[in-house]
Amino acid sequence: MGGAGRGRQVAPGAVSSARVRGAATVVCNAGGTLYAYRDRCAACQEALSGGHFDGRLLSCPSCGASYDVVAAGRAVNGNGHLDPLPLLASDDGTIRVAVSA
């Protein structure tokens, strides 16, 4: 069973975190395009929220691993990738992210 959560607009170059149906998520705005991922580093399994985001690369605050949010969350150095989530943004700035239970 899945679920969806709603959030507010995320400014370009920013990252926001939220819980959607109990799942921790991050939403990144890379050049005006939104990307959503589970809030979990592929390398150390810690939360990505609070990490550095340069507008394209999201870095884990715990281990420093970096992920390219535009390239499906692929790890910059090493193997692994973030878990992408389906996202819909409406004209009024509302963001909907779908997560599986």
Image: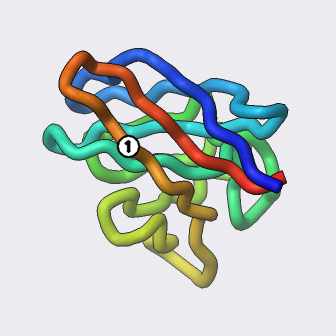
- Nearer-the-camera pick, 100 or 51: 100
Q: Which residue is mark 1?
A: 88
Q: In the picture shown, does residue 35 fall above or below 18?
A: below
- Nearer-the-camera pick, 4 or 67: 4
Q: Residue at x 54, y 41 (%)?
A: 97
Q: Residue furthest front?
A: 1
| Image-based side of 70 in relation to 50, left or right | left
| Kind of residue at disc 1 | Leu
Q: Residue at x 26, y 21 (%)?
A: 11
- Nearer-the-camera pick, 68 or 77: 68
| Image-based side of 64 in relation to 40, left or right | left
Quadrant of the image occupied by residue 39 = top right
Q: Residue at x 50, y 75 (%)?
A: 77
Quadrant of the image occupied by residue 43 = bottom right
Q: How many marks?
A: 1
Q: Residue furthest left?
A: 31
- Nearer-the-camera pick, 95 or 79: 95
The spot of residue 28 in percent (x, y) is 39, 39
Q: What is the secondary structure assignment of the residue under circle 1?
A: strand
Q: Residue at x 32, y 35 (%)?
A: 89
Q: In the picture shown, does residue 63 fall above or below 90?
A: below
Placement of the N terminus among the 4 image quadrants? bottom right
Quadrant of the image occupied by residue 68 = bottom left
The spot of residue 83 in percent (x, y) is 62, 63
| Image-based side of 59 in relation to 101, left or right | left
The spot of residue 75 in percent (x, y) is 51, 71
Instruction: Give the crowd class for mark 1: few <14, some 14-19, many >=20 residues within 10 Å.
Output: some
The spot of residue 48 in percent (x, y) is 64, 41
| Image-based side of 30 in relation to 80, left or right | left
